Image (spheres, rainbow, N blue to C red):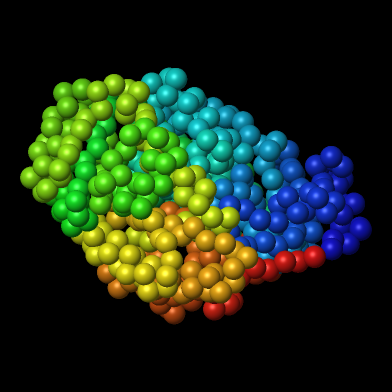
């Protein structure tokens, strides 16, 4: 627990109503959206501005008290689970859009702003912020930046990192640093902005972000292609890209996922298909129409038994919404749902999906697979029950093999969910010992007292497990 004198100092910074250490408040922030991971913090604090964040960090650094920056807790890697106790820092007061600069095509925001609010605000001005994680209705931009979140539009537009051009960051010693800015070019020194994006709160606390915007696409076309086998769908993905067409969205669902989603949304999805590609293209109307016609022809040539283009905006929205609801649909099956991500070159998507199926059979598990086929980022998802420890052992072994297979195929252990606790035991598969050593050296140099979200990224255990601090 936090010493009473330190507690008084923290309360003097944020005021009593913004410091909570009751069992109920601590329990509320002891977990995130990652299953089977929980640890009690010692307190929860809600600063109102950057100055307060800096003052809090200075006290915590002096007394070596861990700090876990937290958005909405939608991350899926245990990234905001306070495994070493300490303070969970919330940004409910720092939730404002500070500036929408139409001349420089930027928006400057505080970390607590909801992602969807940013998207809506800029689209009202005819502009576009492309990153669209599945949790965008409730996730905050600070969390998106910490995890370098992706989304359905990542194939054409990239991920969060591609749109963060400036940051205000409170460093582990309390110093306030500004990186980047409203610039199309900036090569002054190390790229500290990119270093902070995706660092999962282990190097500093983001208190402000400047994001790049692009013009809003003029139109959009949406289509669904159905296949009797995975290979035909995978060939279509490769052929589309090889034809120099980059769709805005190119999503994949396997048959088990499709069946569960249709049972949930009931919009007439074809549950007899072995594989489905959901494809969107945007841009000037003539270009979007031309591309969707070319994509349709490619899908038919590669063996799609049905290709349908949405006739109305309502039909298009229903299709994309069905894909976004995949996790919610799967979560209905069992008490615990483990959604992972493994990324391979797009040419290896069929091999990866096939391997996932074989691994699921080996361990007697149901693993449904969906994801971003266009960039090879797949989401194998296992409905299970955390109370069944024997089954959970099989689940962990299955996912370890899935990550090993992804790396073997030239891929990586995570494309957009981050490392956190869940992937820490597998990071060396991707980076090797030398890569891990470089990352640890950066962490040690910036955060020698290891107060910033400790226990994340670097493995301490053979596998993730439930940890509770009382």
**Going 68% across and 38% down the picture, which residue do you hit?**
92
Vertical order, 381 against 142 (above or below): below
Left or right: where 123 falls relative to 64? left
Vertical order, 83 against 284 (above or below): below
Quadrant of the image containing the N terminus: bottom right
Q: Which of 170 and 453 is in front in this view?
A: 453
Left or right: where 352 falls relative to 413? left
Quadrant of the image containing the C terminus: bottom right
Vertical order, 315 against 382 (above or below): above
Q: Where is residue 333 in the image (x, y as percent from the top left)?
A: 50, 52
**Going 32% across and 29% down the picture, which residue do you hit?**
316
Left or right: where 144 falls relative to 172? left
Q: Where is residue 7 in the image (x, y as percent from the top left)?
A: 87, 54
Q: Where is residue 167 in the image (x, y as percent from the top left)?
A: 53, 44
Quarter of the rendering containing residue 386: bottom right
**Going 10% across and 38% down the picture, which residue do you hit?**
297
């Amino acid at each position: 627990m936090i010493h009473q004198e330190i507690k008084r100092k923290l309360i003097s910074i944020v005021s009593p109503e913004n410091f909570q250490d009751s069992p109920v408040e601590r329990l509320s922030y002891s977990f995130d959206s990652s299953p089977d991971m929980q640890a009690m913090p010692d307190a929860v604090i809600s600063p109102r501005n950057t100055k307060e964040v800096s003052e809090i960090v200075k006290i915590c650094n002096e007394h070596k008290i861990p700090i876990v920056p937290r958005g909405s807790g939608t991350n899926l890697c245990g990234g905001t689970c306070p495994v070493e106790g300490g303070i969970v820092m919330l940004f409910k007061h720092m939730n404002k859009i500070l500036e929408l600069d139409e001349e420089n095509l930027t928006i400057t925001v505080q970390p607590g702003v909801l992602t969807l609010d940013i998207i809506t605000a800029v689209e009202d001005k005819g502009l576009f912020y492309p990153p669209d994680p599945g949790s965008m209705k409730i996730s905050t931009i600070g969390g998106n930046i910490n995890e370098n979140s992706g989304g359905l539009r990542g194939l054409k537009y990239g991920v969060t990192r591609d749109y963060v051009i400036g940051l205000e960051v409170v460093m582990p010693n309390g110093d306030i640093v500004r990186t980047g800015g409203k610039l199309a070019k900036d090569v002054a020194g190390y790229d500290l902005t990119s270093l902070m994006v995706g660092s999962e709160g282990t190097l500093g606390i983001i208190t402000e972000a400047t994001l790049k915007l692009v013009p809003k696409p003029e139109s959009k076309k949406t289509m669904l292609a159905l296949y009797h086998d995975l290979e035909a769908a995978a060939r279509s993905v490769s052929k589309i890209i090889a034809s120099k067409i980059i769709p805005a969205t190119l999503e994949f669902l396997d048959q088990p996922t499709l069946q569960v989603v249709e049972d949930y949304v009931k919009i007439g999805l074809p549950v007899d298909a072995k594989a489905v590609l959901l494809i969107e293209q945007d841009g000037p109307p003539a270009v979007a129409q031309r591309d969707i016609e070319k994509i349709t022809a490619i899908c038919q040539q590669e063996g799609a038994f049905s290709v349908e283009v949405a006739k109305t905006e309502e039909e298009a929205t229903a299709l994309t919404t069905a894909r976004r609801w995949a996790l919610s649909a799967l979560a209905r099956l069992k008490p615990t749902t483990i959604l992972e991500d493994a990324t391979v070159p797009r040419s290896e998507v069929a091999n990866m999906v096939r391997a996932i199926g074989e691994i699921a059979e080996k361990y007697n598990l149901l693993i449904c697979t969906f994801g971003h086929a266009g960039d090879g980022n797949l989401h194998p998802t296992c409905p299970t029950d955390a109370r069944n420890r024997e089954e959970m052992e099989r689940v962990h072994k299955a996912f370890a093999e899935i990550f090993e297979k992804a790396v073997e195929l030239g891929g990586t252990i995570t494309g957009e969910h981050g490392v956190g606790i869940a992937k820490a035991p597998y990071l060396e598969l991707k980076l090797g010992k030398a890569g891990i050593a470089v990352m640890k050296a950066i962490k040690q140099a910036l955060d020698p007292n290891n107060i910033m979200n400790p226990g994340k990224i670097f493995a301490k255990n053979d596998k993730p497990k439930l940890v509770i601090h009382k």
